[in-house]
Amino acid sequence: MNILPKSLQKVIEEFSKLPGIGSKSASRLAFYLINQPKSASKEFGNSLLDLNTNLKNCKTCFNICENEICSLCSDPKRDKKVICVVEHPLDVLAIEKTGEFNGIYHVLGGAISPVDGIGPDNLKIQQLLSRVKLYGISEIILATNPSLEGEATALYIQKEISALMQKDKNLKTLMITRIARGLPVGGDLEYADEITLSRAFEGRKEY
């Protein structure tokens, strides 16, 4: 028999759906909100609603932002000729914390994974190739996760860009690099510390 009010049980169930949140943690979070002032709970709820109404994908790099173009792509101090290719927006946040990278990004939206039904057409790979052709990029840094899916995605992109370079003489000076093995195989960028990511960038090699 459930002794909790339906409204409280519903909140616990919703928290339980979040990654890494079990039933006990969900219950603690729900009871924490109960003990907060109503204004705090209302602000929390409004913040969640704003996620669906105010956020969008940058038209250039597909990172999450509130405007048509994100703050990184529109920053005149960033090196627009160097693109770092990552799987998810959280990877951008992880790399930015290192302070080692001053270029711009391209967020693929995932990695190639046939088992999960995710192929190249499901990712922002064609958009990346369009950026390479249009903006005179000097370097593409492949910073996909060091997993089987991440490696397969990096290899696919490398082959596609190499094919473009063979067709277009203006791309002959383009360099393709892969972040160094400062990251553990099977790990995710979002969980890596700043020092590990910094060393990975410093030790990147031509791909």
Image: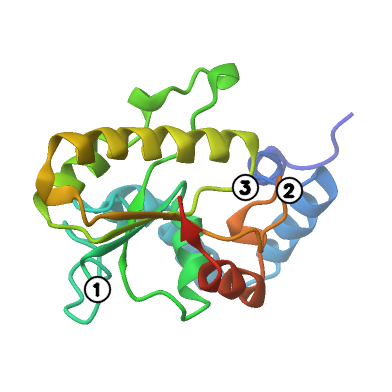
Horizontal arrangement in the rendering, residue 114 relative to residue 188 (left or right): left
Q: Position of residue 33 (x, y in %)?
A: 66, 63
Q: Decide which of tag 1 and tag 2 comes sooner along the chain.
A: 2
Mark 2 or mark 3, earlier in chain:
2
Label 2 to label 3: alpha-carbon separation? 21 Å
Instruction: Please tell me whether mark 2 sits on a helix, a strand or a loop.
Output: loop
At horizontal 61% and vertical 75% (from top left) the residue drawn is: 194
As shown in the figure, which amino acid type bears the numbered disc 2? Gly
Provide the residue designation for mark 1: 79
Q: Height in image: 78 above or below 110? A: below
> 125 and 172: which one is in front?
172
Q: In which quarter of the view is residue 103 placed? A: bottom left
Front position in the image: 66 or 176 = 176
> Marks 1/2: CA distance?
36 Å
The residue to which callout 2 is attached is 20
Q: Which amino acid, mark 3?
A: Pro
Mark 1 or mark 3: name the one nearer the start of the chain.
1
Image position of 99 with respect to 82: above or below: below
Residue at 70 percent across and 69 percent down: it is: 35
To which residue does mark 3 refer? Answer: 146
Q: Which is more toward the observer, 97 or 81? A: 81
Q: Residue at x 63, y 35 (%)?
A: 148
Would you say 78 lies left or right of 147 here? left
* Position in image of residue 81 (x %, y %): 22, 65
